[in-house]
Amino acid sequence: MPEPAESRLVIRTRERYAAVADLRRQGESLSAICRVLSLDRKTVQRFARASTVDDLLGKATARHSLLDPFKVYLHQRWNGGVTEAAALAKEIAAQGYTGSEQTVRRYLQQFRGMITAPPAPPTAPKVRHVTGWLLRRPSDLDPDEHEKLAGIRSRCSHLDSLVAHVKGFAEMLTQRTGENLENWLSAVEADDQPELHSFAIGIRRDQPAVTAGLTLPHSSGKVEGNVNRLKAIKRQMYGRASLDLLRKRVILA
């Protein structure tokens, strides 16, 4: 059975990476590459910083398509003998698909010449879903979410390590064990987690206060709430009332 054709996004990513790498080897500056390839500077920087094309393809292939929720249905209908793209586009449009017929046609093109369509690839979870699984209590996840998160962790050691750090910080936050903060920071700083490194740097700047916040039962939440309320009143009256009226509103509020 022939391999499915690469998407246009993947092909374009490979071509751009090769072009940028070739011009860099020739000693061209980023500005010159932007002019030659007619690309935005940020795009060129992203391609130039990537160590391999796979670093870029990971993001390219992880993008979600409006067609993703309907791929299983398309595969089933194709194997059932319905191979007309226009008809299939109308069927999934009735189910909520909002994309174009051309998108459906391009996706089905890879099946031309095959006896049957291969099984539809599993739909990758969205970033916001994975983030939600990480930040919620494990006991609040249903079995399906547990299974999906476990599958992601088994395939990505980087994310598995991140989950451990997030869980450790959540335990300090909920159980008020701020005495563990130093050990947590040391573990994060020793790990290859650039995003958490910046978070750790921020904590280091005011570590005593953060330790107190993770340990003591006291909170400045009520004070901050009142400050926010007073600022809201002030903004409502900005440029339209005097200090005397503002004072009265604050007192009455």
Image: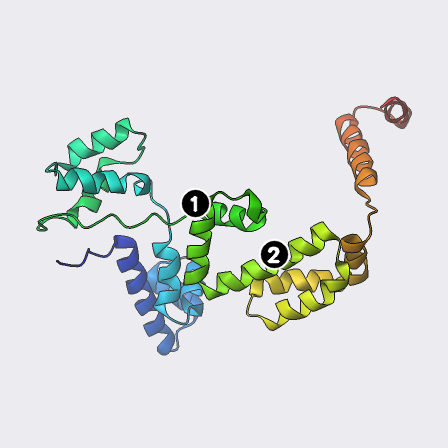
Q: Position of residue 239 (x, y in %)?
A: 78, 28
Considering the numbered disc 1 on the image, is that residue within a helix, a strand or a loop?
helix
Label 1 sits on residue: 144
Residue at x-position 61% and y-position 73%: 190
Relative vertical location of residue 154 with respect to residue 240 in this rendering, above or below? below
Dividing the picture into quarters, in which one does residue 185 lie? bottom right
Residue 176: horizontal and vertical position, in percent?
A: 75, 53
Residue type indicated by callout 1: Asp
Name the quadrant containing residue 46: bottom left
Residue to which mark 2 is pinned: 167
Apparent side of residue 161 relative to residue 60 in the rendered image (left or right): right
**Tag 2: amino acid:** Lys
- At horizontal 49% and vertical 46% (from top left) the residue drawn is 128
Q: Nearer the viewer, residue 36 or 113?
A: 113
Residue 238 shows in this picture: no
In this view, the mark in front (1 or 2) = 1
State how far apart marks 1 and 2 are (Cα): 20 Å
Secondary structure under badge 2? helix
Colour scheme in use:
rainbow
On screen, 156 above or below 131? below
Q: Would you identify the image quadrant in which residue 241 lies?
A: top right
Q: Is residue 8 visible?
A: yes
